[in-house]
Amino acid sequence: MEITTLQKELSTNSYPGRGIVLGKSKDGKSAVIAYFIMGRSVNSRNRVFEVNDRGGIRTKAFDESKMEDPSLIIYNPVLKLDGKTIVTNGDQTDTIYDFMQEGHCYRHALLTREFEPDEPNYTPRISGVVKPNGDYVLSILKSNMGKPQCLRFFYEYPAEAGLGHFIHTYKCDGNPIPSFDGEPTPVEIDGDIDSFTSMIWENLNEDNKVSLFTRFIDLESGKEETRIINKNK
């Protein structure tokens, strides 16, 4: 699989859905994280990211009066535990957190979960964990070619300067929406946190983008820099 750019992957896809990027900065000093959400319905677009009390972020209704069904859209996308950062597109963040807190692996946690119960889309659950040394793992739980059978895939990557991997829920827009296909896409990681954040936000589809979270973690000191952009203000 060839290394591509996030700019190309995002600008040519009007609806990748929710996406996770994990990797290492070009200078080799920082672990890099990005998580974004998109939406087609009023309910999905009515969200913002805000800081939570466990080292990460949660989603929140921007206008409580417009909230229809919180079950699949209100969750903690990012949590921290023992120097590890968990990033997912649903409440499986808490499942992974709870299992890891008890000494288990993220895989054990995800064996208890499956895709979202939103027939006919069966939206995949995508998850990642960044380790203190910058190495990272990604996972996707998705339907079996649109059938309600859960397929589970796990990927483990050593951190490599200037390289990341991108996984998202949907292959593209559609009805039903086709699930992400294949392995996480290797992408270039370049620039500081501000240029990285701007590049992602500017290349997400203007009509469908909702919120973006990015974080650079200094691998020597553990110091974090975080950015949050919400379309709803």
Image (spheres, rainbow, N blue to C red):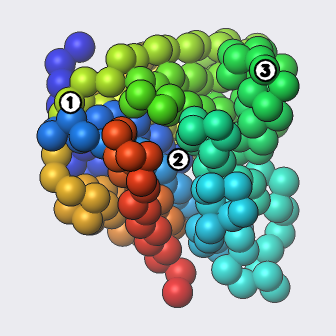
Amino acid type, mark 2: Arg
Q: Is residue 53 left or right of residue 68?
A: left
Quarter of the figure that contains the N terminus: top left
Residue at 20% over, 30% down:
161
- Residue underneath mark 1: 161
Q: Position of residue 170 (x, y in %)?
A: 50, 37
Amino acid type, mark 1: Ala
- Residue underneath mark 2: 18
Relative to 12, residue 57 above or below:
below
Relative to 50, residue 101 above or below:
above
Q: Position of residue 75 (x, y in %)?
A: 74, 54
- Helix or strand or loop: what does disc 3 sit on? loop
- Residue underneath mark 3: 103
- Helix or strand or loop: what does disc 2 sit on? loop
Amino acid type, mark 3: Gly
Relative to 42, residue 34 above or below:
above
Q: Position of residue 229 (x, y in %)?
A: 44, 71
Residue at 36% over, 17% down:
158
C-alpha span from label 3 to label 2 = 28 Å
